[in-house]
Amino acid sequence: MLAVTAESINPDDPLAGLVVGDRPEPASSEGWVTVSVRAAALNHHDLWTLKGVGITEDRLPMVLGGDAAGVDDNGEEVIVHSVISSPEWRGDETLDPRRSLLSERYDGTLADRVSVPRANLIPKPASLSFEEAACLPTAWLTAYRMLFVQSGIRPGETVLVQGAGGGVATALIVLARAGGYRVWVTSRSAEKQRRAIELGAHDAFDTGARLPERVDAVFETVGAATWSHSLKALRPGGTLVVSGATSGANPPADLNRVFFLQLRVIGSTMGTRDELERLARFCDVTGARPVIDSVVPLADARTAFARMDAGEVFGKIVLTP
Ligand SMILES: NC(=O)c1ccc[n+]([C@@H]2O[C@H](COP(=O)([O-])OP(=O)(O)OC[C@H]3O[C@@H](n4cnc5c(N)ncnc54)[C@H](OP(=O)(O)O)[C@@H]3O)[C@@H](O)[C@H]2O)c1
């Protein structure tokens, strides 16, 4: 079958280890099922893998990709939950210390077929296309958990989303708008600011700009480049939810601001299978839909990876086998 694999690790030139080519069919094990992939979405996680984050050389070659929607062995249309917890784990899968994401320990979704535990499948709502459904398991699920599970904020409050063009950021804009929040965004690009407003943001600002007033919550995936601004943007007692650090993971902590203003800093990673089901239903009943940058044949994955690496993307790139 055709698959996109990481064959080697290169922190400075991640595309050097990317191979698009023929791979053996996935092996079937007890309790696992093979899904025919109809659409798979790209995530920054796939670039991190090629840079050696969350994986070691001895696990290569590894099929990349965490997100997929497809058809299972019973002919049912399904979405794959990418968090693989250990068989004995009960409760919130994201808290299992032995959990992995697809493509970290087990082959991922950028392929004609992928094998996953049957318990990791949820039904795809008929109202979502395969391409839309493929965007949900990583970026959209992460945004859903940050906003509706971790932040503790209430509809009517004001949120700031840093780095408006990203996969998680565009999901946050759409979900926050549909959930009844006032949505502000920052972006380095005037064009991305304009598109964020088209998506439903109430206002857009340059990265690092002074805001008209302080906000109730900030949503961070950019990291070092925006961290200080995120802390400054919060009202006393406000909440910063962080799930990523694309520009660097070690900014100044600014602890004085954190304790004097009694800020809450909350980490968030992926989401549970139940949250993925709720997210799919949320999209079904509200009409909220993933923002798709482009749909590209799986065979052209290299171009798609290069665009994501260059930060040119607005929303999600979807690959179709
Ligand atoms: N913890 C989790 O479970 C989880 C899940 C998903 C993603 N993540 C992480 O979250 C991050 C974002 O993921 P993604 O898939 O949304 O990535 P993405 O689509 O590549 O988003 C990157 C966005 O970050 C902004 N950005 C990048 N570098 C910047 C800089 N130096 N200064 C200011 N803004 C910058 C850009 O926004 P503008 O161009 O608009 O300024 C860009 O659109 C990644 O690091 C990823 O690994 C974590």
Image (spheres, helix red, strand yellow):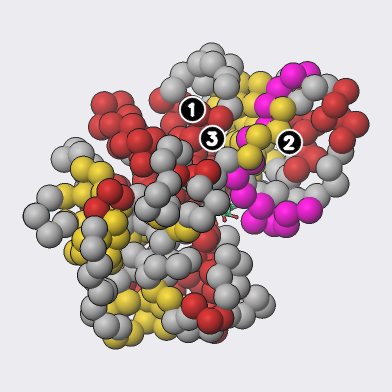
Q: For the residues marked 3 and 2, what is the alpha-carbon distance in whole angstroms?
A: 15 Å
Q: Going by the picture, which residue comes out furthest to the front?
A: 88
Amino acid carrying label 3: it is: Met
Looking at the image, the residue that sits furthest to the left is 75
Marks 3 and 2, the one that precedes in the sequence: 3
Label 1, label 2: how far apart the Cα atoms are: 19 Å
Could you tell me residue 105's position as x and y percent? Answer: 45, 67
The boundaries of the magenta stretch are 236-250
Q: Is mark 1 within 8 Å of ligand 1?
A: no
Q: Which mark is residue 230?
A: 2
Report whether residue 244 is seen.
yes
**Where does the N terminus fall, quadrant-wise?**
bottom left
In the picture, residue 263 is in which quadrant?
top right
Q: Amino acid at mark 1?
A: Phe
Q: Is residue 149 magenta?
A: no
CB within 8 Å, label 1 to label 3 = no
The front one of 88 and 85 is 88
Q: Which residue is mark 1?
A: 148
Which of the two marks, 3 or 2, is nearer to us in this view?
3
